[in-house]
């Protein structure tokens, strides 16, 4: 849940909803293709990459 809040942008409900949807799909598809544990690993790697690319979250406004 922390990962979803940060990925969506703190205080952004739409971003949290979209981030939750994306993470759920990544974990589900990763679980079907490889294994459930690897689905979580893939989701965490995507989280880390997105935090390098968009540190404020996926819907954060640019300054």
Image (spheres, rainbow, N blue to C red):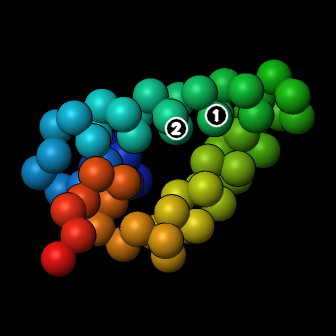
Identify residue for label 2: 23
- For disc 1, the neighbor class at 10 Å (few under 14, some 14 to 19, many from 20) is many
Q: Is residue 1 above or below residue 54?
A: above
Between 26 and 38, the one lying in front of the other is 26
Instruction: Give the left or right position of residue 26, taking residue 22 as reference.
Output: right
- For disc 2, the neighbor class at 10 Å (few under 14, some 14 to 19, many from 20) is many
In the rendered image, the quadrant that contains the N terminus is top left
Q: Residue at x 51, y 63 (%)?
A: 50
Instruction: Give the left or right position of residue 41, taking residue 44 as reference.
Output: right
Q: CA distance from mark 2 to mark 1?
A: 6 Å
Whether residue 23 appears in this view of the structure is yes
Res 17 quadrant in image: top left
In the rendered image, the quadrant that contains the C terminus is bottom left
Q: Is residue 40 above or below residue 58?
A: above
Q: Position of residue 31 (x, y in %)?
A: 76, 29
Q: Secondary structure at mark 1?
A: helix
Q: Residue at x 55, y 67 (%)?
A: 48
Identify residue for label 1: 27
């Amino acid at each position: 849940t922390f990962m979803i809040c940060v990925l969506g942008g703190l205080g952004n409900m739409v971003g949290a909803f979209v981030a939750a949807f994306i993470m759920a799909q990544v974990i589900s598809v990763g679980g079907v293709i490889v294994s459930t544990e690897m689905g979580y690993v893939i989701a965490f790697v995507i989280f880390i990459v997105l935090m390098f690319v968009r540190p404020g979250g996926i819907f954060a406004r640019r300054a």
